[in-house]
Amino acid sequence: SQTIHQWPATLVQPVGSPLSLECTVEGTSNPNLYWYRQAAGRGLQLLFYSVGIGQISSEVPQNLSASRPQDRQFILSSKKLLLSDSGFYLCAWSNRLADTQYFGPGTRLTVL
Amino acid sequence: GDSVTQMEGPVTLSEEAFLTINCTYTATGYPSLFWYVQYPGEGLQLLLKATKADDKGSNKGFEATYRKETTSFHLEKGSVQVSDSAVYFCALTGSGGSNYKLTFGKGTLLTVNP
C-alpha cells in the first residue's frame, strides 16, 4: 500500500530564516505530487504541483519554491521566511489519472 | 472558475443525532466530488468520493450522492459518534485539463457531544 511522509511535523522559525520541508511517497511510481497550505481560519490553497522529476508548476506566486529531485520526493523551500508563511503545510499525491489525492500528516510552521 | 460552497459551522450535535452538511458546487463539465475529513492536528483523510452523476459514495456510515441537477453533494450520517468530531471538507477536481486541481470548500467543524 502507499504511504506518504512529511517532516518535520512542527517547526518554529524566525522571520528571514530559510525553510526546507520534505515529502516522500512510498509504494507507488511516477506519482503526481502537490503542496498545499492551510492558513488559520482558511481553506486549503494549492501552492505547487509536479507531474515528474524537475517539473514544477506554481499556482500562486509567493515567497516559496518547490523542487522534485527524485520521483517520490517533493521539497518546499524558502530563502527568507515571512510572518505570513505561517500555516499548516500539506503534501499530497495522486496517480497519473489524478482522480484522487491522498494527503500526508502535514507540517505546522510558525514564523516568529 | 470552479468553486465549492459548504455550510459554515460550527455544527454541534449530540451523540446518535442525524448529520447533514450541505455542499454545492460550480464547475464546467463533469467534476469528481470528494469529502475529506481532518481530525485535530492531522492531515486530510479521504472520506468518500463520487465520479459521475447519481453515484453514491459511502464510508464509515457516511454517505453523499452526486446530484448534477442541483449541483450538490451533501454529506449525511444517520447516527454520529463522539469520534466523528472533526473538520469536514467538500472538494472537487475539474474535468479535462484542470483535473489535477482540487478545489475545496472552507470546511465545516463538527463537534459531537456525549
Image (cartoon, rainbow, N blue to C red):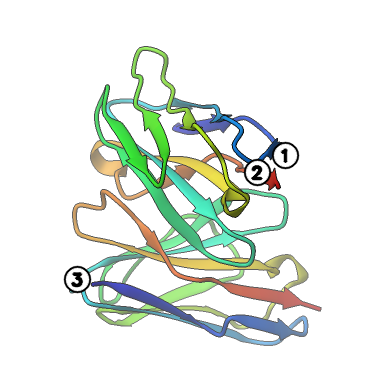
Residue for badge 3: A30
Classify mark 3: helix, strand or loop.
loop
Work out whether disc 2 and disc 1 sit on a shared chain: yes
Q: Which chain carries label 2?
A: B
Q: Position of residue B23 (x, y in %)?
A: 51, 28
Q: Is residue A50 visible?
A: yes
Position above or below: B52 against B48: above
- The Cα–Cα distance between marks 3 and 1, rounded to whole angstroms, is 39 Å
Instruction: Kindly identify the residue that appears in the image at 46 percent across and 49 percent down.
Output: B36
- The Cα–Cα distance between marks 3 and 2, rounded to whole angstroms, is 36 Å
Which picture quadrant has residue B51? Answer: top left
The amino acid at mark 2 is: Leu
Residue B110 numbered tag: 2
Question: Of circles 3 and 2, which is in front?
Answer: 2
Q: Position of residue B103 (x, y in %)?
A: 46, 42
Residue for badge 1: B10
A36 vs B51, nearest the viewer: B51
